[in-house]
Image (spheres, helix red, strand yellow):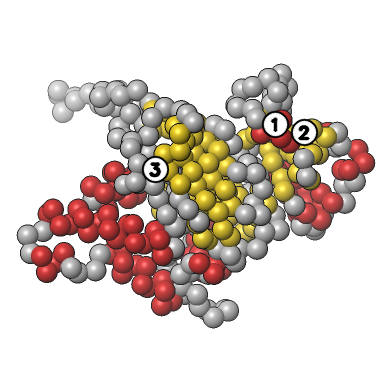
Amino acid sequence: MRLIQFKIPPVVILRVGLIEGDSVFDLTDLNLSWDNIYSIFIEARKANKTLEEFIDSSKFRQYCRTMNYGELLKNRPGDKGGWILPPINHPDPEDCMVTGTGLTHLGSMSQRDKMHKSHSAVQLKNRDEVKQKTDSQKMFEMGLEGGKPERGKRGIAPEWFYKGNGSILRGYNDFLDIPSFSEDGGEEPEIVGCYIIGEDGVPYRLGFAIANEWSDHITERVNYLWLAPSKLRTCSIGPELVTNQSFKDIRGYCRIYRGNNMLYDSGELLTGEDNMSHSLANLEDHHFKYPQFRTPGDVHIHFFGTMKLSFGNRSAFQDDDKIEIHFDSMGADLVNYVRRIPKDSAPVVVQKGSTTPRINAGA
């Protein structure tokens, strides 16, 4: 099943669509409370059904109006014909956690290792030290050795990072920002898992979506310990939530355009468990093993890692550069545009939240 979330002005309500061929079935026509996938899932749980079972039992083909999917895909956010939003979020974005894991794909490890070694070579005078394995290489090799444990056993933990809450999510044809304090942005084409924590505290995977994790590789290159802040950027997912895709062997590509000129072509990208050092179950276990990540009602968007970056193979991004990510069997391509936030050297000034205590002169 392929699901989207979209808006059609002037009505501000979010709508849920089901994709079949070139048609979008407007599920919100069937029930106005179905104004996001989150709400539909909650009702499905109460009916003791999966999301797919619950929607299939709704007779949507009989009662829902349809739209042309191709026409909707042409639109940008704010267009009068409607536009596509991220396929999953929480009604309160603060209750959506966006996280990820890296060094899960061989191509990514090679680039990250090279990035960190090139910086070390500038800092270290002893050439023998440069030849030592970087922490990135060590982490990847740990995954190769213990990232796919036997069923019922816990494997080695992967690299993990936090990106933000649901406010950083961007949808199809929307902008990805390069903040004023950053020199550049960097696409990371991958797949995300989309989860909701049930009232029983159990994580339920709704499905997968194409994603652009959007990081800052220049900041990371300065010192790999800055990887954490380099991840605090907007990111995009969608346009579709695919509920029945196998996460075994998924192939695709990433292309970057400036106007009519192609700046970068990744060639074939490989993801899914067959092309990774960790199993899906191991990645999910090490994310959800923490009790604070199993809060009932929360949404989790978890990136599974990329395999190849354009960083080092293109010029710096400019406004309106177009990034296109395709993965087979994952529905329509994910398309985004780059937007640079104007430079502002002024630091953030923190204000006092209360008056300064007075000193009693007579004390």
Mark 2 is on which residue type?
A: Asn
Mark 2 and 1 residues: CB-CB less than 8 Å, in contact? yes
| Residue at image point 69% right, 41% down | 4
2 or 3: tag closer to the N-terminus: 2
Above/below status of 285 relative to 187: below
Q: Mark 3 points at which residue?
A: 186
Disc marking residue 312 = none
Above/below status of 86 relative to 249: above
Q: Mark 2 points at which residue?
A: 68
| Residue at image point 39% right, 47% down | 310
Q: Which of 109 and 159 is in front in this view?
A: 109
Above/below status of 152 relative to 255: below
Mark 2 crowd level (few <14, some 14–19, many ≥20, 10 Å Cα): few
Disc marking residue 72 = 1
Mark 1 and 3 residues: CB-CB less than 8 Å, in contact? no
Image location (x, y in percent) of residue 52: 78, 54
Mark 1 crowd level (few <14, some 14–19, many ≥20, 10 Å Cα): some
1 or 3: tag closer to the N-terminus: 1
Question: In the rendered view, does 172 fall on the left or right side of 351?
Answer: right
| Residue at image point 18% right, 68% down | 131
Q: Residue furthest bottom?
A: 150
Residue 104 shows up from this direction: yes
Q: What element carries label 3?
A: loop
User: Whole-Å distance between the Cαs marked 2 and 1?
Assistant: 7 Å
Mark 3 is on which residue type?
A: Gly
| Residue at image point 49% right, 31% down | 260
User: Whole-Å distance between the Cαs marked 2 and 3?
Assistant: 32 Å
User: Whole-Å distance between the Cαs marked 1 and 3?
Assistant: 27 Å
